[in-house]
Amino acid sequence: MTIAYGDQVERWRQRDDAPRASRVLVVDDDVDLRSVLADELRAAGYAVIEARTGAEFLDHLADALFSGERAAQPDVIVSDIRLPGFFGLDILECLRHDRWRTGMIVMSAYADRETRERVARLGTSAFFEKPFEIDDLLAAVFDLNLGSR
């Protein structure tokens, strides 16, 4: 996977209001993609939590929920739709039902019309069809982070 940084992302990284400790939960069973996303988000100043399955995704959310600390909750969730053990949209739907206000970015290599409509109904902030440009996803995370301040 080749990453070509755009001038815009580099400018964002240098801004005074660039994120420094915002938490991003990255969920994907593809270890290579998850690692690249996590590394790039860390390089941009984010604290990153990684999960590879739906069960790990739920574990991280439960830890955040039951810790009682706002700082433990992710500010942004970046999740694949198809995860071992769970359908990622089912988890995101539960979060919306429970009124979590965490920004959500969804990605998938398998997005039919029905899935895209469901993603839109959930109020996700962005949808990325794999393969996608890493810079575009970084920009979406950055925009969500600024909007949550």
Image (cartoon, grey):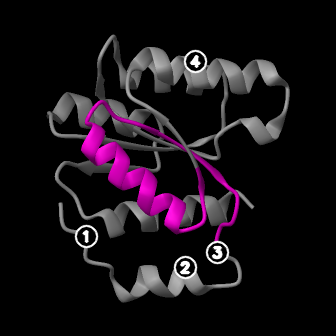
**Numbered range of the magenta stretch:** 18-47
Instruction: Compare residues 116 and 102 and report the one nearer the observer.
Output: 102
Query: Mark 2 = which residue?
Result: 13
Residue 36 in the magenta stretch? The answer is yes
Residue type, label 3: Ala
Query: Mark 1 = which residue?
Result: 3
Instruction: Compare residues 59 and 105 and report the one nearer the observer.
Output: 59
Quadrant of the drawing holding the N terminus: bottom left
Label 2 to label 4: alpha-carbon separation? 31 Å
Residue 18's tag is 3
Element type at mark 2: helix
Residue type, label 2: Arg
Residue type, label 1: Ile
Q: Residue at x 25, y 70 (%)?
A: 3
Quick check: marks 3 and 2 in contact, CB under 8 Å? yes
Visible in this render: residue 93? Answer: no
Instruction: Tell which circle, 3 or 4, labels the residue nearer the N-terminal end.
Output: 3
Residue type, label 4: Asp
17 lies above or below 2: below
